[in-house]
Amino acid sequence: MRYDLIIVGGGPAGLTAAIHARARDKSALVISNDPLASPLCRAPAMANYPGLPGVTGKELVERLLAQARDLGVELKRGRALSVMPMGESVMVSVGSDVVEGRAAVLAPGVSRAAPLKGEAELLGRGVSYCATCDGMFYRGRSVVCAGDAPNFDEEVEFLRSIGCDVAVRRLAGLSILGEDAVTGVRDAKGEETPCQGVFLLRATIAPAQLAPGMETEGGYIKVDGRMATSLPGVYAAGDCTGQPLQLAKAVGQGQLAAHFAIEAMG
């Protein structure tokens, strides 16, 4: 199925974009980890959101989810790994699946983890973000897994089930070793673990890694006044676009991103 709008992220910006798309009678798919596991849902009260004084972060997200579902928004649980404009479509990979939309809105929030030493240089040469996508290349080999993805344990067990020798390490302070290909990792204590593959299973993918070639500024996605990114058919909203990291801004940008994405469809 080809959707009108694919939204990456199930927070206030992403859900607002989806709600606006359905209000305009457009199909919408939201790709997200569990929205109720976000840091916002741990907020005991939202003092800075107009009209809803005292509402908890969890209550707000639950209301947004309920409204989106009632309007017919489709929700797909998983991590978006890449966003690729392809002519009249935008393709989004989710694990080993690929979904297609006429346009996409990126609203993944902000990635809290800094890139590891050696990560960018060895991406695709031993470094992967998805075990179920690339695990078969490492059958019978030694690999290291690190990250905080909700399905981290499942991906580790998948690698073991296909015959990989898996070591689990902490992300903090990890360095990836190798020149033309991964040869191992070094932890914060200086201890090295030889391996042929490294799976970085973070909960979210940083903007520059999610959509290669997209312009960023200070680590945030660069957008214009229509919330359009430098990639055709790709818009962005919320914390991923930069300061201030405020709920009201995220909701407003989500509405604008969906509005202009749909307007561009003609």
Image (tube, helix red, strand yellow):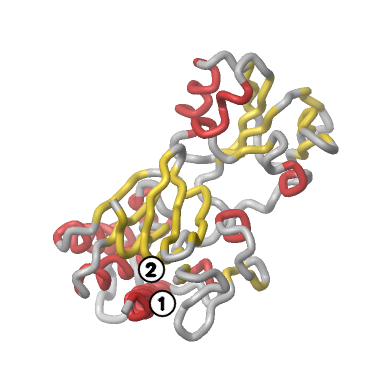
Crowdedness of circle 1 by 10 Å Cα count: few (<14), some, many (20+)?
Answer: many
**What residue is drawn where x is 41% and y is 58%?**
9
Residue 123: % across, % down: 69, 43
- On screen, residue 4 versus residue 197, left or right, reads left
For the residues labelled 2 and 1, say whether their Cβ atoms are less than 8 Å apart.
yes
Residue 192: % across, % down: 81, 27
Q: Secondary structure at mark 1?
A: helix
Residue 229: % across, % down: 53, 73
Q: Residue furthest bottom?
A: 225
Residue 62: % across, % down: 25, 57
Crowdedness of circle 2 by 10 Å Cα count: few (<14), some, many (20+)?
Answer: many
Identify residue for label 2: 13
Q: Quadrant of the C terminus?
A: bottom left
Is 160 drawn above or below residue 97 in the view shown?
above
- On screen, residue 172 versus residue 236, left or right, reads right
- Nearest the viewer among 30 and 244 is 30
**What residue is drawn where x is 65% and y is 22%?**
167
**Residue type, mark 2 in image:** Ala
Which circle's residue, 2 or 1, is located before the other in the chain? 2
Q: CA distance from mark 2 to mark 1?
A: 7 Å
Mark drawn on residue 222 = none
Q: Residue 138 falls in which quadrant of the image?
A: top right
Identify residue for label 1: 253
On the question of residue 248 being in view, the answer is no
Q: Secondary structure at mark 2?
A: helix
- Nearest the viewer among 195 and 149 is 195
**What residue is drawn where x is 66% and y is 73%?**
217
Is 56 drawn above or below residue 34 in the view shown?
below
Q: Residue 14 falls in which quadrant of the image?
A: bottom left
**Residue type, mark 1 in image:** Gln
- Nearest the viewer among 262 and 112 is 262
